[in-house]
Amino acid sequence: ARQSAQLARSIITNFDLAGQFINGQFLIFHKPLIWFKAVTISLEAFMHTPYRYVSKNFDEMDEGMLTGAISRPTEYMFERTGLASIPTRFNRVFEWMVIAGQTEMYKAARVKIASPDNVPFGKVEKLQQEQMDALIGLGSAVRKTLGTDSYAILGIRADQQTLEAFALFAPRFFRANIGLMVEAFGRRGGVAKLTDVEQAAAYTAQNVLAKSIAGGVVLTTALHYGITGRMPNVTDPYAPDWMQVPVGSQYMNVYGPFYGYLRTLARVAYDTQNG
């Protein structure tokens, strides 16, 4: 029942391929080339399983799953038998988008902690303890960047997982968003000081959020100025047009689900400054 509910929700939410933009919202601004590659692989997965990608990146994916950076696949990722497989293909597109994005992001960030020339991917037994700790912290931020988190790592019971599967919202996605922000406000990170779990998680989360916010501001400014000839409202988070672009009689923003969190933080800062 839990798997059926998860599949049904996945079809509803991914039929229009929205997962590439919802779960990939941070990746678009943080690593646009990685986002594009992940989208390409996910679209390929609609027709056939990208075994070539798995074969080329097997050690990287295996290590990333071990450190918690990459989500472990479900049975839907490799199922494509007959007409009955058509509904699951939308789930496969979504899963491959997430896993390919996490894989590429982990590969790009891992070199700052342990160079593949010294410690090849998959050879975790050659890592020093502080390097392994840093990779675990990195993994936490990477999986949250793509809007996922681990039930096992969080210790969420099977009955709660079943309850969440029937929910009309995505608890794991919103939990990942909040977790990424919490990690960003954790210990101060630094490329030369990625020596433990908290530092690596904080540095990666800060990097992701900073680039996402900055990229969103630039894109919002360009769209707003192109449409209205005026700069957007970035000073009053209580106004309906804050960090949004007018489209007809309504407003839209480029932040997706993250907009609500961003606006809340802006209101807290606004109220603090203005008493």
Image (cartoon, rainbow, N blue to C red):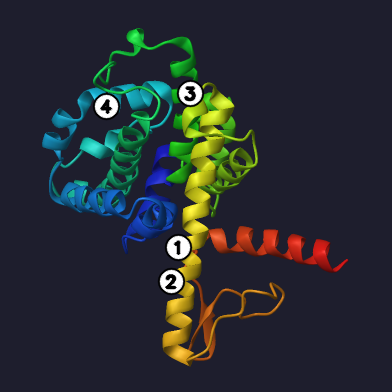
Which image quarter is the C terminus in?
bottom right
**Residue 54 coordinates in the image, percent (x, y):** 18, 32
Which image quarter is the N terminus in?
top left
Q: Nearer the viewer, mark 1 or mark 4?
A: 1
Question: Tags 3 and 1 in contact by the CB under 8 Å rule?
Answer: no
The residue under label 1 is: 215
The residue under label 4 is: 60
Residue at image position (49%, 19%) is: 133
**Disc 2/disc 3 C-alpha distance (Å):** 33 Å
Residue at image position (27%, 27%) is: 60
In the image, is 13 to the left or to the right of 175?
left
Would residue 46 be visible to someone looking at this image? yes
**Disc 2/disc 4 C-alpha distance (Å):** 33 Å
In the image, is 8 to the left or to the right of 241?
left
Residue at image position (48%, 65%) is: 216
Sequence-first disc among 3 and 1: 3
The residue under label 2 is: 219
Sequence-first disc among 4 and 3: 4
Q: Secondary structure at mark 1?
A: helix
**Residue 202 coordinates in the image, percent (x, y):** 56, 36
**Residue 4 coordinates in the image, percent (x, y):** 39, 43
Quadrant of the rendered image containing residue 66: top left
Q: Nearer the viewer, mark 4 or mark 3?
A: 3
**Disc 1/disc 4 C-alpha distance (Å):** 29 Å
Q: Secondary structure at mark 2?
A: helix
User: Which mark identifies residue 275?
Assistant: none
User: Which mark identifies residue 134?
Assistant: 3
Q: Secondary structure at mark 3?
A: helix
